[in-house]
Amino acid sequence: RGDAASAKAESRSGPSIKQMDTDGKGTTVEGIVTFRSDHRSGGGFHLGVADESGDIHVKFWNEAAAAFKEHSAFRKGARVRLRGFTLHALNPKELDYAPPGRRHCLMYHGADTVKVQELAAAPAVPAPKAQGAAATRA
């Protein structure tokens, strides 16, 4: 096949996100960061990462969260490749809150296991425009 989707799939360094979630195995995930949520307590955070097949949550805890909290790859819109995670099967309580069909999430606990590659930076966010009298003064 010569279409763009097959070229994209062939250039990926692992299974698609959907395939990884379905099979429960894989060592690399590649996709676009779709959201980031910083936890109110405990210092952890989690991301949504998506490719053309689906999406998965990636959770950072403990030393991994502390070491990678400010990493530029973890901004919405960045394209990333992740390795070193634990593929965690969702328990019954987690499944109640997961999207239909979701079976796994990815977890990092130790900073030394996190392998992240930023393949493309997140789009720049435009600065807010100045308003009021201060904006009109020269």
Image (spheres, grey):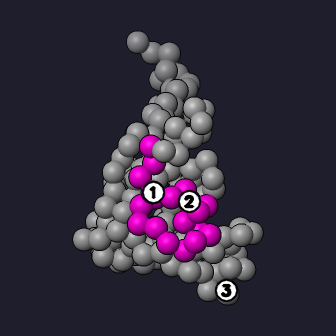
Q: Which residue occupies 40% across, 39% down?
A: 120
Front position among marks 3 and 1: 1
Residue pointed to by mark 3:
93
Q: Is residue 43 visible?
A: no
Residue 59, percent from left and from top? 47, 70
As displayed, is residue 19 above or below residue 12?
A: below
Front position among marks 2 and 3: 2
Looking at this view, name the residue that lies furthest to the front: 1
Q: Which residue occupies 56% across, 59% down?
A: 17
Which amino acid does the dot numbered 3 rest on? Lys
As displayed, is residue 107 above or below residue 137?
A: below
Whichever of labels 2 and 3 marks the residue nearer the N terminus, that label is 2
Looking at this view, name the residue that lies furthest to the bottom: 92
Quadrant in which the C terminus appears: top left
CA separation in Å, label 1 and label 2: 9 Å
In the foreground, 82 or 66: 82
- Element under disc 1: loop
Classed neighbour count for the residue bearing mark 2: other residues with Cα under 10 Å, few (<14), some (14–19), many (≥20): many
In the foreground, 7 or 133: 7
Residue 7, percent from left and from top? 52, 38
Residue pointed to by mark 1:
14
Left or right, 37 with respect to 111, comes to right
Residue pointed to by mark 2:
17
Q: Which residue occupies 57% across, 32% down?
A: 2
Q: Quadrant of residue 109?
A: bottom left
CA separation in Å, label 2 and label 3: 22 Å
